[in-house]
Image: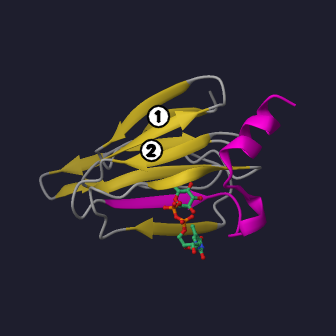
Amino acid sequence: MNYKLIDMKVFGDERGKLISLEGNKNIPFEIKRVYYIFDTIPDFERGKHAHKNLEQIIVAMDGACQFVLDDGKTKETVWLNRPDKGLYIGPGMWREMRHFSYGCKLMVLASTYYDEKEYIRDYDEFLAGVNR
Ligand code: T46
C-alpha cells in the first residue's frame, strides 16, 4: 500500500502550537501546489479516483473525515482528525473520502501542478492498470 501516516513535529508552548512543513525535508517531495477542502457535508463522498504520478500529503486542519485507500488488491481505512498527522498518498492508490464532519477542513500539499489527465477516475481502468 503506497500510503503512510506521518507524525508532524509540533512546536508548542503556553501560547499554542505551531507546525512547519518544508518540501524535501519533512514533506518527502517538492511542494508544487497547495489546495484546501472546506464546507464539507457528512452525506457527500469525495475522491473516487487514483493518480498516475502525483504524491500528496493531506492534513485535517479542523474536524475529521475517513479515507478509504485501495491499491486494487486491499482496502484500508484511515481517519484524519488531527492537524499534527499527515496522510501521505503516493501514485497508484484509489482513494475515497467519506464521513466528513460538518466544516471539516483539509489542507493538501501536492507534488505536481493540477492536471486532469493525471487522474484515473474510472475504477475498472484503475484495476486494469494495477493488474497489467
Ligand atoms: C485528491 C483528493 C484528496 C482544480 O481545478 N485544481 C485543483 O488543484 C484541484 C485539486 C481540483 N480542481 C478542480 C477539479 C474539479 O472540477 O476542482 C474540482 C473538484 O475536484 P475533485 O472533484 O477532484 O475533488 P476531490 O475532493 O474529489 O479530490 C481532491 C483532489 O482532486 C484529489 O487529487 O487526492 O482531493
State if disc 1 and disc 2 touch (CB < 8 Å).
yes
Q: Which amino acid type is shown beneath numbered disc 1?
A: Leu
Given the current orientation, which residue lies at the most extreme front position? 124
N-terminal label among 2 and 1: 1
Whether residue 52 sits left or right of residue 44 in the image: it is right
Whether residue 127 sits left or right of residue 97 in the image: it is right
Asked if residue 5 shows in the view, the reply is: yes
Q: Secondary structure at mark 1?
A: strand
- Residue 106, percent across and down? 39, 59
Q: Quadrant of residue 84?
A: top left
Give the CA distance from mark 2 to mark 1: 6 Å
Q: Which residue is mark 1?
A: 5
Question: For mark 1, does the 10 Å Cα neighbourhood hold few (<14), some (14 to 19), or many (20 or more) residues?
Answer: some
Mark 1 close to ligand 1, CB under 8 Å: no
Residue at 80% across, 37% down: 128
Which span of residues is magenta-colored? Answer: 105-132
- Residue 49, percent across and down? 61, 51
The C terminus, quarter of image: top right
Q: Which residue is mark 2?
A: 86
Q: Is residue 92 above or below residue 63?
A: above
Q: Which image quarter has ligand 1?
A: bottom right
Residue at 61% across, 42% down: 94
Nearer to me, 57 or 69:
69
The N terminus, quarter of image: top right
Q: Is residue 116 above or below residue 94?
A: below
